[in-house]
Image (cartoon, coloured by chain):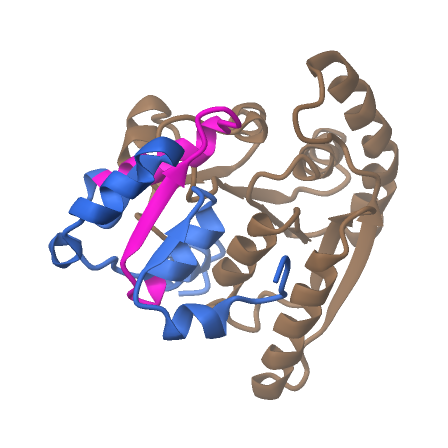
Amino acid sequence: LVVAGSGGHTTEILRLLSCLSESYSPRHYVLADSDNMSEAKIRSFEEKRAETFSKSQFSLDRIPRSREVRQSWISSVVTTLYSILYSLPLTYKRKPDLILCNGPGTCVPVCLSAFLLGLLRIKRTIIVYVESICRVETLSLSGKILYYFSDYFIVQWPDLKKKYPKSVYLGRIV
Amino acid sequence: FRFKDSLAEELQSADLVISHAGAGSCLEALEKGKPLIVVINDKLMDNHQLELARQLHRDGCVLYCNCSTLVETLQSMNLSALKPFPPGQPEKFASFLDKVFGLQ
């Protein structure tokens, strides 16, 4: 299950997917309901992929946006909880083995839902979070939250590895 | 023009790129091997944009300035001193995930 966020996030995550083998299939993309550009990028990526891997499969689902840029902390908690009402049944339906995300607000409700399903012993999903390449010295808000809920937290710059020792540093991967 | 789906064509034929500090814009220009001047908007400062611009500057890959020093920068720039920007390696990520799932 791949969480796509607006603009740059989607471009980065598609780059991350570019070298994955077909073992990572079918791919279920989750987008915020207000995001149009990401759908086009994803379709384009999958079409290209289907040229090499003909049996390639993917799906697209949408959930309410959990937070607008610069939205206040308190209202963000409310809107995120609202998004969880959608992400929980979706994650339950898809029961992914792996969730891959890179920082948009949309990933918080999705990952928390998977984490919850894990606690309830319904499905154990591995959550892999890759912090965006623009985060050199500080983590994004999603990163700060999911650092504690992800199985693997990947950062792309050495400063972050120093500050967040449980993270994984692979260098620049996009 | 105001907006275009992709600036790839324009970037390909450019000799110099002047851009805001958005990650996508910077990386696209650098990956095409174009000299890049990043302009930081002091007033609309989005902190995390600045982090990447600063790091790229430290690595010697871009020149940076703000709106008021742009002209000065253009006049005194030494583009040949800019270092090339090595591409990212998504294969390392694929390899890492394969290990996690025992696919290697």
Q: Quadrant of the N terminus of chain B?
A: bottom right
Q: What residue sits 56% from the left and 50% below the top?
A: A8
Report which quarter residue A38 is drawn in. Answer: bottom right
Colour given to chain B in the rendered image: blue
Find residue A33 and report its horizontal and vertical position in percent: 83, 47
Q: What residue sits 73% from the left and 33% below the top?
A: A109
* Residue B91 in the figure: left or right of residue A24: left
Height in image: B77 above or below A135? below
Find residue A158 and report its horizontal and vertical position in percent: 27, 35
Q: What residue sits 47% from the left and 39% below the top?
A: A131
Residue B60 seen in the current view: no
Q: Quadrant of the C terminus of chain B?
A: bottom left
The chain drawn in brown is A
Q: What residue sits 81% from the left and 32% below the top?
A: A84
* Residue A20 in the figure: left or right of residue B38: right
The count of marks equals: 0
Height in image: A80 above or below A57? above
Residue A54 seen in the current view: yes
Q: Is residue A81 magenta?
A: no
Find residue A106 and report its horizontal and vertical position in percent: 70, 39
Q: Give the camera-side residue of B94 and A96.
A: B94
* Residue A127 in the figure: left or right of residue A55: left
Q: Is residue B50 magenta?
A: yes
Find residue A162 and report its horizontal and vertical position in percent: 28, 26
* Residue A45 in the figure: left or right of residue A39: left
The part of the chain drawn in magenta is: B31-57
